[in-house]
Amino acid sequence: MKFWEKSANNNLSRLQVQRNNKCNEHDIVSYIKDLIDLKESDSLLDVCCGNGLITKELSLYCFQVTGVDFSKKMIYNANKECNYSNIKYIQEDALTLSNSVNKKFDKIILYFSFQYFNKKQGENVLSEMKKLLNSDGKILIGDIPNKKYYWSYYDTFIKRFYCFKQYFLKQPQMGRFWSEKEMMKIAKKQGLKGTFIEQPKHLPHSHYRFDYLLENDSDFKNLNNSPL
C-alpha cells in the first residue's frame, strides 16, 4: 500500500502505466477495446485502475465505467484528473471488490497489475471479478509477465543481481511471473473458459508479457445445471 501511495505522488505515475516510446496509452486503449469487444451499451469495471488514465480513455467507447483501486491517493488523482460524467471511482481492495461494488458488468478488465498478487490472491481476485460479471460478459487480465520468459527478462548480471536482492528482501518490484498453465487452472476453478493471447509486437512489453481473456464456460455451466 505504501509503495502505491508514494507512486501516486510521483508525477511520472500520472501515466498510470509507464511505457516506452514504441507505444502510448491510445494504442493500449484501442487494443483493449478490440480485445474485449467493448460496445457503446456496455458497462465496464476497471480493477486496479490506478489514477484512471486508461479508465478515462475507455469510457469514450462504452455506456458507463467504474474504476476501483485500493490506493486512496490514486482514486483522488483519478477523480481530479481523469473523470467524465459516465465514470465512477471507488476505493476498494481487489480482493474484496464485492464489498463496495454492488452491480454487475458486461466487461471487466485488470490491466498491468495481476503480477502483484500471489497465487492464492490471484484466485481470490478472479473469484471476486466473476461475482460481478454478467453471464455473457468478458474478463480481461492483461499485461501479465510470462514465466516462460523469466530469464529472458532478467538477461543481464545487473538485472539478475537486483532480482535475487528483491527476492531475498521480499520486495519484488516486478511481482509474480505467471504461466499459461497456472492461468488455465484458476480459470477452470472458477468455471471460466480462458484464452491465452500473445500480445501484438507493437506493444512495448510483448516480448515477455501476455494477456488472458475469460468468459463463462457454457460446458461447465451445463454440467452443473444438469439433473443428477
Image: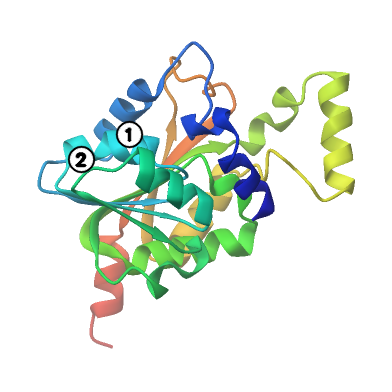
Place of residue 74 in the rendered image (x, y in percent of width and height, measured from the top left): 49, 48
Is residue 114 visible in the rendered image? The answer is yes
Badge 1 element: helix
Which quarter of the rendering shows the N terminus?
A: bottom right
Residue kind at label 1, given as amino acid type: Ile
Question: Mark 2 sits on what residue?
Answer: 38
Give the residue at x 65% y 57%: 118
Question: Mark 1 sits on what residue?
Answer: 32
Give the residue at x 75% y 43%: 172
Place of residue 38 in the rendered image (x, y in percent of width and height, measured from the top left): 20, 40
Local crowd at mark 1 within 10 Å, few (<14), some, or many (≥20)? Answer: some
Give the residue at x 61% y 40%: 7
Residue kind at label 2, given as amino acid type: Leu
The residues bearing labels 2 and 1 have C-alpha atoms spaced at a distance of 8 Å
Is residue 48 visible in the rendered image? The answer is no
Residue 14 in the image: above or below residue 68: above
